[in-house]
Image (spheres, rainbow, N blue to C red):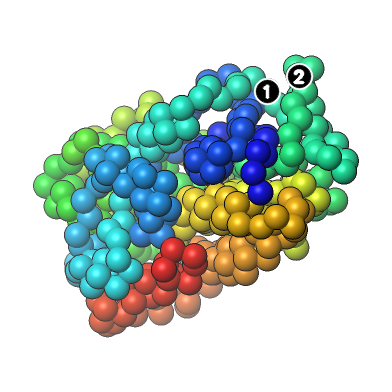
Amino acid sequence: MNNLKVIIVGSGIGGLTAGIALRQAGYEIEIYDRVRELRPGGAGISLWSNGVKVLNRLGLGSKMAAIGGLMNRMQYRRHTGELLNDIDLAPLIEEVGQRPYPVARADLQQMLLEAYGEDVRLECKCVGVHQDATGVTAYFENGHTARGDLLVAADGVRSILRQYVLEEKVEPDYVGYVNWNGLVPVDPELAPKDMWMIYVGEHKRVSLMPVGGDRFYFFFDVPMTKEDAQQAGDIRTDLTVFFTGWADPVQTLIQRLDPEKTNRVLIHSVGPLSRMVRGRIALLGDAAHTTCPDLGQGGCQALEDALVLTHYLMTTNLGIEYALKRYERERMERANPVVEKARRRAEQIHGKDPNVTQQWYDQLASEKPTDVTGAIAKIILAGPMR
């Protein structure tokens, strides 16, 4: 189909990438967001090869490589520092055909904004929609209205438009742990600069991975009840208590992080959902499938959404609703299993069943490195970017 006008609600990774892909297809695009100022949600993100391939397809490969971290190996260590597994990522890169790139979210957001090339209309909270036989009208809290041939609801984990599409309210589900994340300068006292370092123990986790600008993206995970998770204390004090007795690099990281620039996030999941489309309105990204970060696939699934949506709109003349149904079918078959697998992985890592978590620790110490990379490759290659 040609000459479409698309309204996009939400300017996160999925919304911006959809805007870029659809604009490259020749469509007229308007992107709206409820926020007053565009700020990335979190410090960093791991973009595995399937997500990077989408950006390559959109002509952003060299720019992505410039801002991404060079990650050649990953290591798992016990919380006290002993090596569990040392994994060369070269076999993974060879199997899937693309290097992964951990990246600072602010850098990724800026790259996508520049590639989109138009202003995002801020302070526009979409509070309702109406569709008819010829298009969709979006209504905003500030009184503005926008009309297009279709609407992409990329408004995140707490999507307002998800209820309209599903015809029922689905709340994000707290998955049982809190994550602190931020950026610190690269230093060999923390980890080798080309390595993803992961410490595990006591149902907790600490991770360092390289991003552009000679920095590490770090995170700490601590399981806790929803009630306890609501009680946020001083960041450095809390982390010092939670990670008492952990290896020296973990203690160094706690002292070097900037509490004012460290995010504290209660991790939630949404899905799998029963549908992603209603008429001319399609959910995309976290609005459709908020994924626990334990597989590193949340952002990648949003990127895949954007490309698949564009593909079906471009390659049929049977109508918008037909194209969106094709999009829905393919993306539900792909993204819903990823949501479920990521949730199981989160539970395995964070001690929902302590026996299962201990078995995982034991497995890390004994499994072949190629088994680890093979499992990652299987997830990557199950999607459209093979």
Residue 130 in view in this figure: yes
Q: Residue at x 35, y 43 (%)?
A: 60
Q: Nearer the viewer, mark 1 or mark 2?
A: 2
Residue 311 falls in image quadrant: bottom right
Is the residue marked by circle 2 packed among few (<14), some (14-19), or many (20+) residues within 10 Å?
few
Q: For mark 2, what is the residue?
A: 144
Going from N to C along the chain, the mark reached first, 1 or 2, is 1
Residue 313 percent across, percent down from the top left: 64, 52
Residue 382 percent across, percent down from the top left: 48, 72
Comparing 136 with 182, the one in front is 136
Q: For mark 1, what is the residue?
A: 124
Residue 225 in view in this figure: no
In which quadrant is the C terminus drawn? bottom left
User: Could you say whether the residue bearing mark 1 is in a helix, strand or loop?
Assistant: loop
- Which residue type does callout 1 highlight? Cys
Tell me, yes or no, whether the two marked residues, 1 and 2, touch with CB atoms within 8 Å. Answer: yes
Q: How many marks?
A: 2
Q: Residue at x 68, y 23 (%)?
A: 124
Residue 160 falls in image quadrant: top right
Residue 130 relative to residue 239: left or right: right
Seen in the picture, residue 344 relative to 53 is either above or below; the reply is below
- Which residue type does callout 2 highlight? His
Q: Residue at x 46, y 27 (%)?
A: 117
Comparing 127 with 178, the one in front is 127
Seen in the picture, residue 145 relative to 91 is either above or below; the reply is above
